Image (cartoon, grey):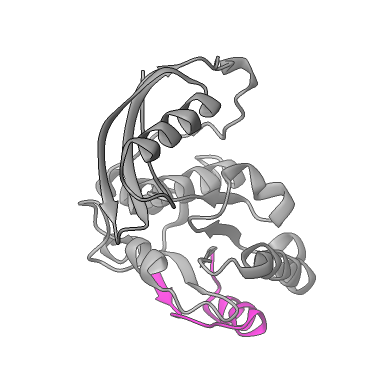
Amino acid sequence: MVQVSFTLPVPPGPKAEGAALQLAAKMGLDPAMVVHSHGIGGDFTFFVVYGSATHIVDLDAVEVVEREYPLLSPAEVNGVLRKLLRRKLVVVGGCIGTDAHTVGIDAILNIKGFAGEKGLEYYRELRVVNLGAQVTVPELVKRARAEKADAVLVSQVVTQRDAHILNTQEMSAAFREAMGDRRPVLVAGGPRFDPLMAGELGVDRVFGRGTTPGEVASYLVHALRTAQPEGAT
């Protein structure tokens, strides 16, 4: 059973409800029932429709990025980093291009965090450099080299003409040209990114909407462990 809501450019009334049921049928809801409707400005009607979906979901055809690492507490993250690095892990982050939306990167980096979790600034074994908004790619590469960054986190919200894709590809190419195999771990995040796009973007990991600081910190530990197995010096 599925519940959907939508607005049609039709004045409220029986004809509008009939139009809503017609649309629901085309969506694959059969039978369907209008459980709520009200007019908006006289020329539009908002609907809530409830019905039985006729479509079949094929789980074998679903492609997602499975998390292949455990979620760690801040204490566990700090403990692993102390053991593996014997110094603080350096994270440089910011919004590249003309993107001025820092809510996402701040939610991950700032100590106030997101969804009840403290940001990466809270972790004792992390040193965080937040460059803020509208950072150019050359500036990001230069600062990452100067800070000897282990990881670079970029956030992209602006999506006009696929700007988030082009900016991220430019960023990853610049790091490879400037640093080759010695480049830092590259992580991209934003509401329009698909985690399956990491290869296309040239980054190591992509995080989508709702990502928490703990997920990012746990991934950085995983990436470090992969590159430097425990016990290595």
Q: Which image quarter is the N terminus in?
A: top left
Residue that appears at 64% across and 77% down: 141
Residue that appears at 58% across and 41% down: 226
Q: Position of residue 75 (x, y in %)?
A: 25, 47
Is 123 drawn above or below residue 93 in the view shown?
above
Residue in front for this viewpoint, 210 or 116: 210
Q: Position of residue 61 (x, y in %)?
A: 64, 21
Residue that appears at 60% across and 25% down: 62
Residue in front for this viewpoint, 9 or 164: 9
Residue in front for this viewpoint, 220 or 14: 14
Q: Position of residue 144 (x, y in %)?
A: 57, 76
Would you say 198 lies left or right of 152 here?
right
Residue that appears at 43% across and 80% down: 132
Would you say 220 lies left or right of 110 here?
right
Q: Position of residue 24 (x, y in %)?
A: 46, 29
Is residue 131 within the magenta segment? Answer: yes
Query: Magenta stretch?
Result: 127-150
Would you say 51 lies left or right of 190 here?
left
Q: Residue furthest right?
A: 177
Q: Quadrant location of residue 185?
A: bottom right
Is residue 147 within the magenta segment? Answer: yes
Is 136 drawn above or below residue 197 in the view shown?
below
